[in-house]
Image (cartoon, helix red, strand yellow):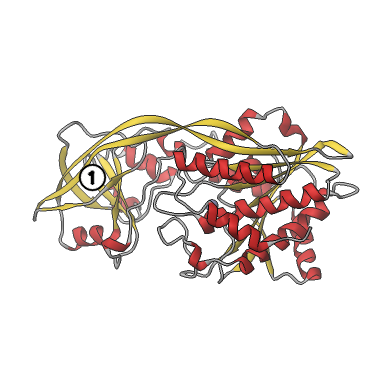
Amino acid sequence: MAMNSLREFELLKKIGFIRTSGSEEELKAANILLEEISSIGITGHLENFKVPTSKIKKASLKVIEPYEKEYEITPYNCSVSTPIGGITTDFVYIEDGLGANLVDIKGKLVLINKGPDPKLYKKLLAAGIAGYITMCGTAMDEEEKTDITIARMREKNTKYGKVPALFMRMKDCFHMVRNKASKVKVELITEDIELTSHNVVVTLEGSKYPDEIISFGAHYDSVPFSTGVYDNGAGSVIIMEMLRHFKENPPIRTLKFVWYGSEEVGLLGSQAYLKAHEEELKKHLLMINVDVAGSILGKESALVTAEQSLVDYIDHMAKIKGFPLKVEQNIYSSDSTAFADAGIPSVTFCRFAPTGGAFIHTRNDVIDFLSAEALEKTTLITKEFSELIVNSIVFPIEKKIPDNMRKELDKYFNKESKKEN
Ligand SMILES: [Zn+2]
């Protein structure tokens, strides 16, 4: 059966609602995917896993010197609370947190240009900060048209300890710095809770090599405020189309199709899958991920976390078939990276919009910037590659993560070498 991008686009509209990690809506989307799977004549199932998050009970920030003004804030999920009644402390802007920015910050609430990476986070904690503020949006944002980011504190940071942490609009941060805010009162009261998230899983048994597995992956959750059609309802419907294709054209190797939940809060769905299927991983040869697609404006990309020969192969394939595709050896911040970290070569296909051409992680990730025609581009590339690889006479990809990619993965997951102190 030919690829049908109109059918893909219809399914994309069906799951185009906000579906955050562990929410009822995420489960609703999982069930829509399951229904679609059974309409193809296949049975899928859900695999659940726990996701730590938190409930906000109180969140306020007020500048008290040299002027008085309240600002809107959002705590990080899984931030720690301040004492009830809040704390009054000095406020300081530490830019990117370079050496000289970190002098005399003990006990202060610090404002950083962007969320701290583990290295900076560790330094901030060692310096004894009272808490930190991360900026989101731009200095020009209008309040009615934008939302304050909600994100979860990541384990690669919190393993060093926790302090109250929150997001603010960049335009408000700009206002505070410009007006020389020096003393603030901040109160964050949150409660740690656990939600249940789900992966949707389907197996198509291989006719000749059932013990050799290639998996297709796409995350189907969204961030708050976002209908997540570009990121990543699009990838979700593309791998559904792959499932249809391989149902019609039975593969010689076993295929797994997994729609991952809770990717947006730190690849939790793929990590749960890897943990729950440890034995099975020995049989996995390759993971094919699709993340962000369908934007009317854009360019096709493939990020290959595998040996260089696979990069060259995909590049040649694209040229021979006339696909405009940028291929590079790299890691991609999605579930493919969790697989690569587990030693399974991975490829992510995506369609990147030029800056401002389509949007992720905001309320502007909406269907208006996407089309069936654009969705078809990534679908056809994914299909061309998959069909050849899945049914190769001799499987050509070595199950090995090259050293340069291993380095990138270790950096991404912040696996420090023992020498670091
Ligand atoms: Zn994504």
Q: In which quarter of the image is residue 139?
A: bottom left
Q: Where is residue 79 in the image (x, y as percent from the top left)?
A: 33, 37
Can you say whether 268 is above or below 349 in the image? above
Horizontal side, residue 10 vs residue 216: left or right:
left
Near-viewer residue (41 or 262): 41
Q: Which amino acid does label 1 sit on?
A: Leu
Element assignment for label 1? strand
Q: In which quarter of the image is residue 276?
A: top right
- Report the number of discs: 1
Q: Is mark 1 within 8 Å of ligand 1?
A: no
Horizontal side, residue 188 vs residue 281: left or right:
left
Mark 1 lies on residue:
109
Picture quarter with the N terminus:
bottom right
Near-viewer residue (40 or 305): 40
Using the rendered image of the protein, determine whether residue 266 is visible from the camera's viewpoint. Answer: no
Question: What residue is at 73 percent from the left and 69 percent from the top?
Answer: 323
Q: Position of residue 295 (x, y in %)?
A: 56, 66
Q: Position of residue 127 (x, y in %)?
A: 30, 40
Question: What residue is at 49 percent from the left and 70 percent from the top?
Answer: 357
Using the rendered image of the protein, determine whether residue 78 is visible from the camera's viewpoint. Answer: yes
The residue carrying pointer 1 sits among few (fewer than 14), some (14 to 19) or many (20 or more) residues within 10 Å by Cα, namely many
Horizontal side, residue 249 vs residue 220: left or right:
right
